[in-house]
Amino acid sequence: MSAHVSNNSGKEEWYTPEHIMDLVWSVFGRFPDLDPASCEKANEIVKAKQFYTKEQDGLALPWHGDVFLNPPYSAGMMRKFIAKATWSYNRSEIKSAIILTNNASETVWGQQLLRRSRAVCFPQSRIKFLNENLQPANTPLQGQMICYLGAESMKFNKIFKDLGCVMIEGYYR
């Protein structure tokens, strides 16, 4: 079977591994204030002060502070969560955000996110996400990008550079 995006699992939820959250916590200097697309199980790793579940609808609720976002991995939901993140940042409703997505730079939402990001990390290998039991699951069929919206792009670079190539405001570091 070939590794092609059309062969993906169809799952929307891919839980973030702790080694990625260690980097996120280091950039923020603490746990995130909000994870707007989460659940109780995922927050055992993310440790956000507040999180919104699917039932609460994080798109309809206010966002604030330092946000970590690993949005649902369906095109429609991804587009909506990226739009909400960039809108909230542009309106200074959130201080900063670290957003983990598939590397889909050719999509409308990917372009929107990249144009607003102050820094982006392209991991040198695919991230092995966790399943609902917080155990490593299968490696995704495509790579990821971790985008940063905020005023600490150099700090983001320093912390994420060992994970992969970091692009800061248009320059590779």
Image: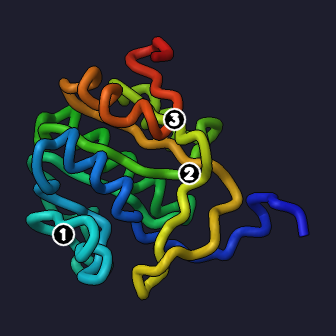
Q: Amino acid at mark 1?
A: Phe
Residue contact at pointers 3 and 2, CB within 8 angstroms: no
Q: Nearer the viewer, residue 7 or 141?
A: 141
Q: Secondary structure at mark 2?
A: strand
Residue 22 as seen in the image, left or right of residue 104:
left
- The residue positioned 39% from the left and 16% from the top of the image is 169
Q: Which image quadrant for residue 150?
A: top left
Earlier along the polypeptide chain: callout 3 or callout 2?
A: 2
Earlier along the polypeptide chain: callout 2 or callout 1?
A: 1
Q: Which image quadrant for residue 168?
A: top left
**Disc 1 designates what residue?**
51
Residue contact at pointers 2 and 1, CB within 8 angstroms: no
Q: Amino acid at mark 2?
A: Asn
- The percent position of residue 88, horizontal first and vertical second, equals 21, 43
- The percent position of residue 47, horizontal first and vertical second, equals 18, 67
Q: Secondary structure at mark 1?
A: strand
Q: Residues within 10 Å of mark 3 (few under 14, many from 20)?
A: some
Question: Against 165, is 79 above or below?
Answer: below
**Disc 2 designates what residue?**
102
Question: Which marked residue is nearer to the observer: mark 3 or mark 2?
Answer: 3
Inter-mark Cα distance, 3 to 1: 28 Å
Question: Against 94, is 51 above or below?
Answer: below
Residue contact at pointers 3 and 1, CB within 8 angstroms: no
**Disc 3 designates what residue?**
164
- The residue positioned 53% from the left and 36% from the top of the image is 122
Q: Secondary structure at mark 3?
A: strand
Q: Amino acid at mark 3?
A: Gly
- The percent position of residue 83, horizontal first and vertical second, equals 37, 46
Q: Which image quadrant for residue 117?
A: top left
